[in-house]
Image: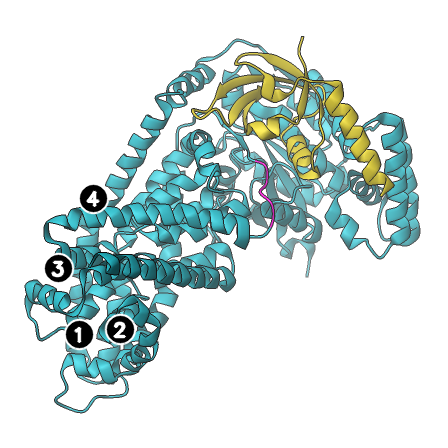
Amino acid sequence: MTPHKRPISAMLVGNPNCGKTALFNRLTGDHGTVANYSRVTVVARSCEVKHRGARLNITDLPGLYTLNGRLPEERAGRDALHFDHPDVVVNVLDAGNLHRSLFLTIQLVEMGRPCVFVLNMIDEARSHGISIDTAALAAALGGPVIETVAVDGVGVPAVADAIHGLSDRPESWRAPLIPYDSHLEAAIAHVQTIIADLHPATLDAGQSRWLAIKLLEGDSELLERESEHQALIAEVRAACVDLEATHDEDCATMIAHARFNFIQTLLASVRTVVSAPTSRSRLTHHLDNLLLHRHLGLPILAGLMWLMFQATFTLGAYPTTWIDTGMQALTGQVDGLIPPSMLHDLMVNGVMAGVGGTIVFLPNIVILFFFMSILSETGYLARAAFLLDRLMNSFGLHGKALIPLIMGFGCNATAVMATRTIESQRSRLIAILAAPYVSCSARLPVFILFAGAFFGDWAGTVVFALYATSIVVALGSAILFDRMVVAGKDEPFMMELPPYRRPTPSSLCYHVWDSAQDFLRKVGGVIIIGSIAIWFLQQYPAAPAGYTASQRLEQSYLGQTAAAVTPVFAPLGFGWKDSIAILTGLLSKEVVVSSYAVLNAQDKGSDGLRKSLSSGMTPPVAISFMVFVLLYAPCLSTIAVIRREAGSWRWAGVSFGVSLVIAWSLAFVTTLVGGLFA
Amino acid sequence: MSVALKKKALSQVASTASALTLADLTTGQKGIVVGIGHTDDTLKRRLTAFGVVRGIEIELDRTAPMGNPRTYSLLGYQLSLRNEDARNILLRVE
């Protein structure tokens, strides 16, 4: 295999909001297959493209501010750079925010991989009166520097050329040496000699210097990896103690300060700033004066949320109807095509019903993600988090968790997906676990049926009270998960407020397409399996001829299971029909209503259904039942999404288990208290 | 053990020597970071990653409606911090 046959691997690394994803999309174009999804997750994407006869394998790492951190994306980024040995590192910098961007650059160049430096959003920097001497910067950083406006594709081919060129001639890469204080340098040299003794001839000078600096910085993961070398650890500790004693500062701070000085000096020689506030930065300032106003900020946010919520579910209603009609027509076709048989029943009542019930959420997801991308791309999402952080923090939630929770009123599965905007994995997990308690639109048919049957004129008040309960339980559960369930400590809340930017149609399309594809592909699999399982449990063992629908259900595996779990529900006052409804509702909450329709099939029409309900239950038990349905077990789609977003079945299991306990307990209290009044 | 003690002693010196912290700034007021007071490693690392190191100039821009968090201007960008974290950043004001 000649070197040219092997693809050139390049990794894009940069701060969040630096336009890295736009550059990735431009570099990879519409060609090739993109694995995984976009920047709002920890997962990296990669794509292979052809460039001037060579194959470039480009990976977009998650946005990060440091390689030393403990956030999952920071670890993922560092490990990818360290263990996957990319041929070229493409460091994307926000040209208008060079000072902060260079902190990451220093860490990258010290790692020693050949780097290409991309000054992105150069147009924005110029409009701020900033001009950069790229030749001088390239000389100082040791690798090519390219100016780009990635969203418009300006300078992007030059980036591909630079990757290609640097991988062909890696010897042209000259890693700059960051000078440290003489005492620090002595310590670094000392640690380097110990490393050389421990790993003879495995690390070159640059690599051992990098490792020595990392150890002196106190990078805990590296220390753990090297823990078998007690001598090294002891020497590093001793060196740190000596330095700290003479300098009144810890080693990490000294190293940070030296890097800061290097950046200061570098910027002074390559950057010229004509400091006149331009129209762009004035625009951000004026918009913030309004949108972050102490009194108006929150009402404006509430208004925008309301609009987004309304649009998601009113605009979504039209395509939902079309999909519903389409699915019914398709089901009709399948119905006619397959002769009556077990396969026929499985397809029509199992697979088609299950898939049809889920796919109707697609328009809501597409519209919601369209709005979420607009909020995120413009920079307003960070402002919303800023406005709400204080309130949300008192419940152990991150400022950015409010929007997903509000989305939960429409659909919990979309809410869980919307938590992707929260960078901190721990805060995100708490939001994911709290979201299923928000009363989604699928619960509403159940409430309407029961409240209508039992409470007549008071039905509206009862439904309102249930919504209030759902909010209280969602926030209360967040406190519980924060204090007791999710391990670890919160990362400090530190968030950049990027300047307002115009979202580009291509990135909006990308996000929307991505979320739709994701929903269909991954949730689709689970839904089909789940639907088949429930269908099977409902159909078997086969009932003797002449049984009514209700009798057939009673003797099926599902009915038998319901009979088995009925004792659990007895203290709440629920019967076996209620148990069946609860079990089938695991698939999706509106199935509770259709189950009652099947169970009471002899009572035609909704009036008949209401009458038969109200004869079988007392009003307090009806409230208790609604409370139970409100809180128990996220639906199958939501469980599938929790599993995917939280990264393991464990959290899906926690969500399921905790919700059953909460639902049962609160329903029991409702039955008890209701019994006192009845 | 001695390392931990020394660190503790150092940080106490740092926190008592200067009374002014980032949380004490008034809107529009500027200060120079002189150090990060007694705190765990995580906060220090994050602050360093965001460019909050000794010697930089920082200005209070805005306060959120409920008084917390607040946004600051530094190095030409805006950073939002909770007051409990800002309290650990020691300042010198000209």
Co-location on one chain, circles 3 and 1:
yes
Q: How far apart, in angstroms, are the residues tagged by discs 1 and 4?
A: 32 Å
| SS class, disc 1 | helix
| SS class, disc 3 | helix
Q: Residues at badges 2 and 1 in contact (C-beta under 8 Å)?
A: yes
Co-location on one chain, circles 2 and 1:
yes
Q: How far apart, in angstroms, are the residues tagged by discs 4 and 2?
A: 32 Å
Lower sequence index among marks 3 and 2: 3
Chain of residue at mark 1: A
Q: How far apart, in angstroms, are the residues tagged by discs 2 and 1?
A: 9 Å
Q: How far apart, in angstroms, are the residues tagged by discs 3 and 1?
A: 16 Å
Magenta range is: A488-492
x then y, percent, for residue A600: 13, 73
Lower sequence index among marks 1 and 4: 4
Q: Which mark is residue A314?
A: 4
What secondary structure characterizes most of the magenta part?
loop
Q: Residues at badges 1 and 4 in contact (C-beta under 8 Å)?
A: no
Chain that is coloured cyan in the picture: A
Q: Which residue is mark 2?
A: A580
